[in-house]
Image (cartoon, rainbow, N blue to C red):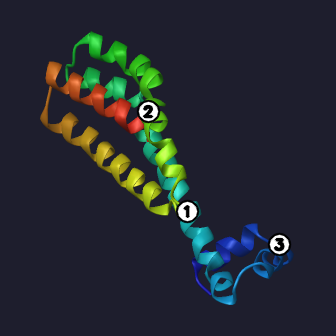
Amino acid sequence: MNGFDNLHGLFVGDDELAQVCRDLPESACREQPRNYGLHVVSLSLTRVGEGLTDAKLVLAWLLDAIGAPTWAIGLLVPVRESLAMLPQLLISARIRRFSIRKTVYVVGCVVQGVAIVGFGLVGLTLSGNTAGIILRTTCSLNSSL
């Protein structure tokens, strides 16, 4: 029994597991605790990433710390809020055509992770107007995923 089995057992009772496993093949049922644990870890890391790149707090602080102009700081939240749904509107119909959407979500997570690493690199290497433009653009892309 591994850590994921323990985590799964903590939140899901035997009767619920039996109900889920009734409709699944035996091999899929054995993978249920592992998949549950991976899902919990993934959602937790996503939440931490979102907190680290919060446009209202962390990115505003980062832009101020690297000397970005005030206009860039002032546009962070309006740009994020107004453009957040645009990519979803453009690609959602195509995504619904896939019978298995796992790959799309994994690609989205990877792009979001790269954007977060990009925030850090911009903060370490750039300053002023250039940093403001890049961080504002990356913020709107990251929030739409």
Is residue 43 found left or right of 122 in the rendered image? right
Q: Quadrant of residue 52?
A: top left
Asked if residue 142 shows in the view, the reply is yes
Q: CA distance from mark 1 to mark 2?
A: 33 Å
Between marks 2 and 3, how big is the CA–CA gap? 36 Å
Badge 1 marks a residue whose secondary structure is loop
Residue at 66% in and 71% down: 7
Identify the amino acid type marked 2: Asp
In the depicted structure, whether residue 127 falls above or below residue 17: above
Question: Which residue was labeled with disc 3?
Answer: 16
Give how far across and how far down residue 17 sits, in percent: 78, 76
Return the mark for residue 54.
Answer: 2
Q: Residues within 10 Å of mark 1 (few under 14, many from 20)?
A: few
Q: Amino acid at mark 1?
A: Ser
**Front tag of 3 and 1:** 1
The residue shown at (46%, 55%) is 105
Label 3 crowd bin: few (<14), some (14–19), many (20+), radius 10 Å: few
Q: Position of residue 56 (x, y in %)?
A: 44, 24
Q: Is residue 34 above or below residue 104?
A: below
Observer-nearest of 68 and 76: 76
Disc nearer the start of the sequence (2/3) = 3
Residue receiving disc 1: 99
Task: Single out the residue that lies furthest toward the right.
Answer: 15
Separation of marks 3 and 1 at Cα, in angstroms = 27 Å
Quarter of the picture holding the N terminus: bottom right
Q: Earlier in the sequence, mark 1 or mark 2?
A: 2
Q: Is there any visible trace of residue 53 in the rendered image?
A: no
For badge 3, the amino acid type reads Glu
Say what secondary structure mark 2 lies in: loop
Q: Nearer the viewer's eye, disc 1 or disc 2?
A: 1
